[in-house]
Structures are given as structure tokens and as C-alpha cells.
Image (cartoon, helix red, strand yellow):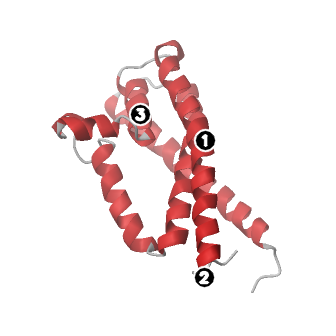
Amino acid sequence: MSPANLISIIIGKSLVTLGINSLTLFVGVLLIRYVFDCHINYLLMVIIPIISMPAVFGFSYIISGIVIKFKEIFAFLQVLTGLLFIFSGVSQPITFLPYNLGKVSKFIIFEKMIYIFRRVIIDSATLSEISNDLIYIFIYGLILNIIAIFIFYYFKKKVLENGDGLYV
């Protein structure tokens, strides 16, 4: 037990994680710049994650609702991580996927984020060149948040009705 309330602990952990990940990203960007001699627009490297946050939070709400309902957290996250690696083009190019699966990957927000990061790093894209993609991510994130909140509360309501042991 801790004398601090739960919200303070969650916010503190989130801020520390954000700081560590930001430092890791900064060091990675510096290594890419000096090892591969890429000219990177640092402002865009900051703007892209900020604009992508609503979509990532929406995706997290959906995952939270599913985990509340089915309780298999680690197995679900392992499967989800593998699928995201496949569909976002991290493990292999998306062009290697079958045609229909390639279409599915276009609706996964992480694929679009990676695509924009690659354009900024490799092609030295400017804000005007990627503005349509950023608008798409932002609108997609807002819509995904609305849908995700309904999904989360639906699963929460079902678990409370069934008495499946939700700890809220």
C-alpha cells in the first residue's frame, strides 16, 4: 500500500515513461542523423507523435475493454503485438502481404505513423507534404476515440452485469 493516491501514481509513472521514451527517441534520431547523414526536421518529429496521440489512446481504450472482458492479458497482448508488427510493416514490407491484408493494414494507425516518420527521415518531407496524412491521423484518432469509449463502456457494463470480477 502506498500513501499516494492511485491517480498520482499513474500520472507519475506516465510522465517518467514519457520522459524515458522521449530521450530514447531523441538519441535514436541523433544516431540516424549522424550515421546515415539524413537531414531530419525535428519539429515534424515532435508534431507527428503529438497529433497521433488521440489515435493511440483510442486504440488503447479498445484494448482495455477487450482485456477487461476476456481477462487473458498477456496472451492477448502477445497476439496483438505480432499482428501489429505484421500489419504495420515493421517485420516485412506491406507489399509482401496478400492484397486483402494490405488493405487492412491501411486502417491501422501505426502503419500510417511509421509511413510518415519514414517520409520525414528518408525523403526529408516538409509539413506541407505530409499535412494531408497528419489531418487523416488526427480525424481518425478523434473518430477512433469516440468508438473506443463506447466499446470500453460496453465491455465494462457487460462485465459488471455478469459479475466477472471487474475491479473498478
Q: Are marks 2 and 1 in contact (CB under 8 Å)?
A: no
From the image, state whether disc 2 or disc 1 is nearer to you. Answer: 2
Amino acid under disc 2:
Gly
Query: Which secondary structure, mark 3?
Result: helix
- Which circle's residue, 2 or 1, is located before the other in the chain? 1
Query: Which residue is disc 1 drawn over?
Result: 54
Residue 112, label in figure: 3
Question: How far apart are the two marked residues, 2 and 1, measured between alpha carbons?
Answer: 29 Å
Q: Residues within 10 Å of mark 1 (few under 14, many from 20)?
A: many
Q: Name the spot of residue 8 as percent of width and height, x first.
A: 78, 66
In the image, residue 75 above or below residue 134: below
Residue in the image at 73% along x and 69% along y:
9
Residue 83 falls in which quadrant of the image?
Answer: bottom left
Residue 6 falls in which quadrant of the image?
Answer: bottom right
In the image, residue 3 above or below residue 18: below
- Which circle's residue, 3 or 1, is located before the other in the chain? 1
Amino acid under disc 3:
Lys
Query: Which secondary structure, mark 2?
Result: loop
Amino acid under disc 1:
Pro
Residue in the image at 38% along x and 31% along y:
115
Q: Name the spot of residue 51 as percent of width and height, x first.
A: 59, 33
Query: Which secondary structure, mark 1?
Result: helix
Q: Quadrant of the N terminus?
A: bottom right
Query: Which residue is disc 2 drawn over?
Result: 165
From the image, state whether disc 2 or disc 3 is nearer to you. Answer: 2
Residue in the image at 50% along x and 68% along y:
67
Residue 104, label in figure: none
Q: Depth check: 6 or 168 in front?
A: 168
Q: Residues within 10 Å of mark 3 (few under 14, many from 20)?
A: many
Q: Residues within 10 Å of mark 2 (few under 14, many from 20)?
A: few
